[in-house]
Amino acid sequence: MKKRFFVKFLKYSSLVLFLVGCQNDLYRFNSKFNLPKISSESPIVLVVIDAKVQSNFLEIENLKKTLEYTKIPYKTNLVDGFNLNPQIPKTIKVLSLQQTIGLTDASIDSITNFVAKGGILHIPKMVRDPRMAFLMGLKPEAKLETNTTAKGFYFNKPVFPDKMGLVHDYVDPFIGLDKDNFKDNIHVLVSAANDKDYPVLLENMVGDGKVILINTSFNLLKNMRGFLFSSLI
């Protein structure tokens, strides 16, 4: 019962973050608010950061803000540090990473094992790493063709409570992988508003775990914090 209540609370929290954040970027973490304290409990989310990719820092900060706001305990690790010791602590339930090119094969194997045993791998941006094809739900023969026209959000599943069928317009195209690259058994949670076949947020089951991919090339900014957070849970 407590677990169901906690999950429901997180879903409603993400809905608030998304809806308010989409209204002219009114949702802000600035001096008017007290900064939330990071939980002192054992972390359940691990965010792996590639320090060589500066463009991802803003998105990572937005993700960290949502975790702090909802008091979900997390920790961060740099790619170089993760490569030195790719063992994922047993308390970690979700591993989030933006880039994989800097990861060693041993690190990729550790992540695959983590997912197969029931963990959640969260990829908030499309990656073109052939070692990740299986985890991302790509076909072996995928040509990695890019869709340059799909944009906007159509919620096929209730990512937010009672919001299945919600449409949210967004001006920028996703510039992600076209639907033909993916296997037929992936679960598409969110499609493009102007192309229902294009997977924006997808889920790929691997063993006892799953991989969550946001199929886009652009950074999810402050007004998309709720969507970014909801993809974690």
Image (cartoon, rainbow, N blue to C red):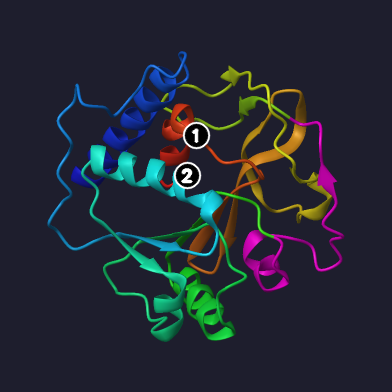
* Above-or-below relation of 145 to 218: below
- Mark-to-mark CA distance, 1 and 2: 6 Å
* Above-or-below relation of 99 to 55: below
Residues in magenta, as a range? 128-150
Pick out the residue farthest to the top: 23
Residue at image point 66% right, 45% down: 217
Of residue 88 and residue 170, the one placed in the foreground of this image is 170
Element assignment for label 1: loop
Q: Main secondary structure of the magenta part?
A: loop
Specify whether residue 176 is painted magenta. no
Residue at image point 49% right, 77% down: 113
The residue where tag 2 is placed is 59
Dot 1: few (<14), some (14–19), or many (≥20) neighbours within 10 Å?
A: some
Element assignment for label 2: helix
Residue 182, x across and y down, in percent? 76, 54
Q: Is residue 78 left or right of residue 191?
A: left
Verify CB contact (< 8 Å) between mark 1 and mark 2. yes
Q: Is residue 33 left or right of residue 183?
A: left
Disc 2 residue type (three-letter): Glu
Of residue 222 and residue 12, the one placed in the foreground of this image is 222
Tell me which label, 1 or 2, sits earlier in the chain: 2
Residue at image point 31% right, 37% down: 10
Residue 7, x across and y down, in percent? 31, 41
* Above-or-below relation of 66 to 158: below
The residue where tag 1 is placed is 221
Dot 2: few (<14), some (14–19), or many (≥20) neighbours within 10 Å?
A: many
Q: Is residue 59 left or right of residue 3?
A: right
The number of numbered discs placed on residues in the rendered structure image is 2
Disc 1 residue type (three-letter): Leu
Residue at image point 43% right, 34% down: 225
Q: Quadrant of the rendered structure where residue 5 is?
A: top left
Q: Quadrant of the rendered structure where residue 25 is?
A: top left
